[in-house]
Image (cartoon, rainbow, N blue to C red):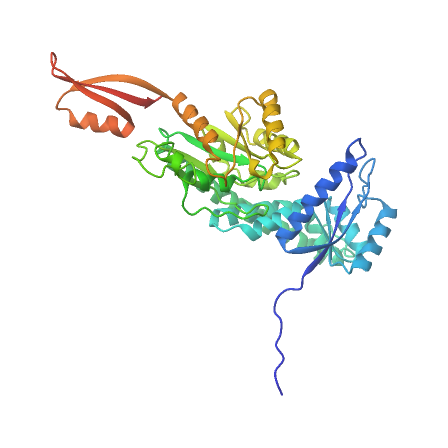
Amino acid sequence: MARELIDLAPPEERAILVGAPLKRTNARHTAAEHLDELARLADTAGARVVGTLTQQIDRPDPGTYIGRGKVEELKALVAEQEATMVIFDDELSPAQGKNLEGELLKRVIDRAELILDIFALRARSAEARMQVELAQLEYSLPRLRNMWTHLEKFRGGIGVRGPGETQLETDRRLVGHRIAVLKERLREVEKSRAEQRKGRKNIFRAALVGYTNAGKSSLLRALAGGEVFVEDRLFATLDPLTREVSLSTQGATDGPSDRPSGGRKDKHPILVTDTVGFIRKLPHHLVASFRATLEEVREADLLLHVIDASSPSWEEHRLVVDEVLAELGAQEKAVLHVFNKVDRMAPGEAEALAARLRELLPDSVVVSAVEPGGTRPLISALQAAASRGKVETEVRLAAGDGKRLAELHRAGEVLSTAVDEETGELVVRVVLARG
């Protein structure tokens, strides 16, 4: 008898999305946008959206978030669509999650837990995996009690501690210990990164920040070339990636991109780092645990805030990123707003955006990471920013002092040399970093 093949692939998750915005003027409009983004997050995590439910509320119901009547409607929708899980767009309290799962008899997660799951799926490096694990543990710690509800009939207390409470305390102790271990390891990573940055203190550094899927990785690839992973999905990149970028324009006008296709290589290029994307309602635990990685943001000379110009929600996205930067303590950093994906806009729309930006954000640039010549405005802005961090000076040294001359070549850009015949000294014009 032929042996039947067993499909070991996990069954497909069928998800119902729930949005419950607070009542206000534009709540219905923003709810649709937020649920559309939640659907993209669910797709990234591997779930198929089979239905949505929305409910405008005055305030969240403390027991079920959406109220008893809407829970009954949700239960019917779950049965009708044969859904296997329900995803809420807003963060649920431990009690709300427990009550909803009890009513629906399906797994219930919120936006924060979904994002954490995506990060766990996308984490590649050891550092990223530690950061995600730390965020997940800190998120789950107040929710451990719900995992032992089948034992809650046992009362606790001195002398009468039941197995439920004993197990809960054991889990809390183990989770707390693991959190402490991960935090210590990430502190070591942060120290290591600080040592690495010391060797780059004389190099101009820019960090790409922005809403997820704004095109940061595409811009880095257009500027630096080489292998840079790019995917049209939310949170395609978690680990920071630093590339050396030449700002020379020799030969750039004839090539398919703005990177030099000929001529000499810059002696002193800049470093550009791609960082993890932000998103609205980003879990606070995740921001906290990624502080070691996002230290690159705080240490950068210039933040390149990349914005998807083709998105109708770009203004909200910009404010979300500004809020996260403030949470990271980087609100005082120099920022250049880079409006990307202009190639996806109609000519009239692009012109209207440029006119508006001249009033709203006059120092911004409009670029395309895919069109030939599309990043030239950004390169010009980077050249100007890097030049502001340098000073041109004249240095005199003995004509035979090759050691000091070599040090000048390493520390800056030697523009010219000449011999002063009267003193027998070497006169060197050099560009050095300020400070």
In the rendered image, which quarter contains the C terminus? top left
State whether residue 435 appears in this view. Answer: no
> Which corner quadrant of the image does residue 105 belong to?
bottom right
| Extreme residue in the right direction | 69
Between 22 and 285, the residue placed more toward the observer is 22
What percent of the width, then of the height, locates residue 234? Answer: 59, 46
| Extreme residue in the bottom direction | 1
| Extreme residue in the top direction | 422
What percent of the width, then of the height, locates residue 346? Answer: 61, 36
Residue 405 shown left or right of residue 339 in the figure? left
Residue at left 49%, top 35%? 374
Residue at left 66%, top 51%? 42
> Which corner quadrant of the image does residue 376 belong to?
top left
Residue 291 shown left or right of residue 14 in the figure? left
What percent of the width, then of the height, locates residue 144? Answer: 68, 50
Residue at left 82%, top 55%? 77
State whether residue 368 appears in this view. Answer: yes
What percent of the width, then of the height, locates residue 168? Answer: 67, 53
Between 187 and 253, the residue placed more toward the observer is 253
In the rendered image, which quarter contains the N terminus? bottom right
130 over 433 or under it: above or below: below
